[in-house]
Amino acid sequence: MANRWRQYSYAEQKNYLRRVRIILSWIAVFFLIHTIISGLIVSNRSLENNTMKPGLLAGDRFVFSSFTIQHLFREHPGGRLPFRRGQVVLVDRAAGKPLAKMLLDTVVRFFSLQRYSLFPREDTLFIKRVIGLPGDTLSINNYVVRVKPAGENYEYTEFELAESDYVPELPQVSPQWDESIPFSGFMDTITLKEEECFVLSDDRSITNDSRTWGPVPANSITGRALVRYWPLNRLGQP
């Protein structure tokens, strides 16, 4: 009866459409707020594997800051970066994709509760540690990186320069691996170009990072881990 009354009552139809518009407006506002917060301020991410062990484990969840605003308003390519050596960061290898597709991907992920994406997220989003900054000269010996910062005359181990304490997992080198293999634990000296950074996994065995990708653009580092909030017994700064 109510549906029949709505069908023939202009006032009821008008009220029904007004309620629909209000609901859609609230959805749009919530979507906008969510997009601004997750894209420009903070987001939460889960570590899906053990590439950052022993310190960070699969299932750990983090709050990440966003570097979108900093990347947009840096005065020049050599300007101050919003992250430091040794910090845990989010590397988005989809950065630089067409803007229209990136925006559509945001919509898809929002309405699917982050379950679906236009990009294979496990192949584009990585939690890594910053080892080298633009202009650094780096080499790897037995899985440990030696760094000569830009403009300096001496080189240091990655741990001496890092602003965060961490202990990587160093595997035993297979006798069949020679130094030409990315996971052999050795790398010839390279110098990072302007706007290039070098990121590694804490697990230095067969895990993808700058040893296989090469240096990554600074603007592909889209966030820094602020706090690990799960599990509660490991709550704190990563």
Image (cartoon, grey):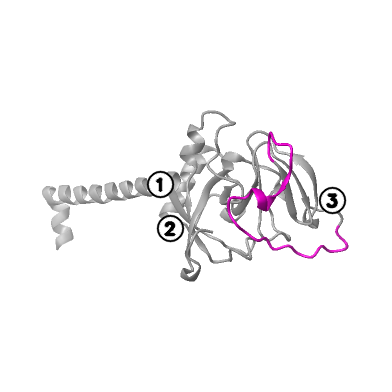
Most extreme residue toward the top, as rendered? 76
Mark 1 / mark 2, whichever is N-terminal:
1
Most extreme residue toward the bottom, as rendered? 233
User: Mark 2: which secondary structure?
Assistant: loop
Residue situated in front as seen by the camera: 231 or 124: 231
Check whether the beta carbons of the residues at disc 1 and disc 3 lie within 8 A of each other.
no
Check whether the beta carbons of the residues at disc 1 and disc 2 lie within 8 A of each other.
no
Q: Residues within 10 Å of mark 1 (few under 14, many from 20)?
A: some
Mark 3 / mark 2, whichever is N-terminal:
2
Chain part drawn in magenta: 149-177
Q: CA distance from mark 1 to mark 3?
A: 43 Å
Mark 1 / mark 3, whichever is N-terminal:
1
Q: CA distance from mark 3 to mark 2?
A: 43 Å
In the image, taking residue 150 as reference, residue 41 lies left or right, namely left
User: Mark 1: which secondary structure?
Assistant: helix
Q: Give how far across and how far down residue 232 sits, in percent.
A: 46, 69
Question: Which residue is denoted by mark 2 in the rendering?
Answer: 113
Q: Quadrant of the C terminus?
A: bottom right
Question: Which residue is denoted by mark 1 in the rendering?
Answer: 35
Residue type marked 1: Thr
Residue situated in front as seen by the camera: 95 or 16: 95
Q: CA distance from mark 1 to mark 2?
A: 13 Å
Q: Is residue 178 magenta?
A: no
Q: Residues within 10 Å of mark 3 (few under 14, many from 20)?
A: few
Q: Is residue 159 magenta?
A: yes
Residue type marked 2: Leu
Q: Give how far across and how far down residue 75 sits, in percent.
A: 51, 29
The secondary structure that dominates the magenta segment is: loop
Residue type marked 3: Ser
Question: Which residue is denoted by mark 3 in the rendering?
Answer: 180
In the image, taking residue 204 as reference, residue 35 lies left or right, namely left
Q: Quadrant of residue 142?
A: bottom right
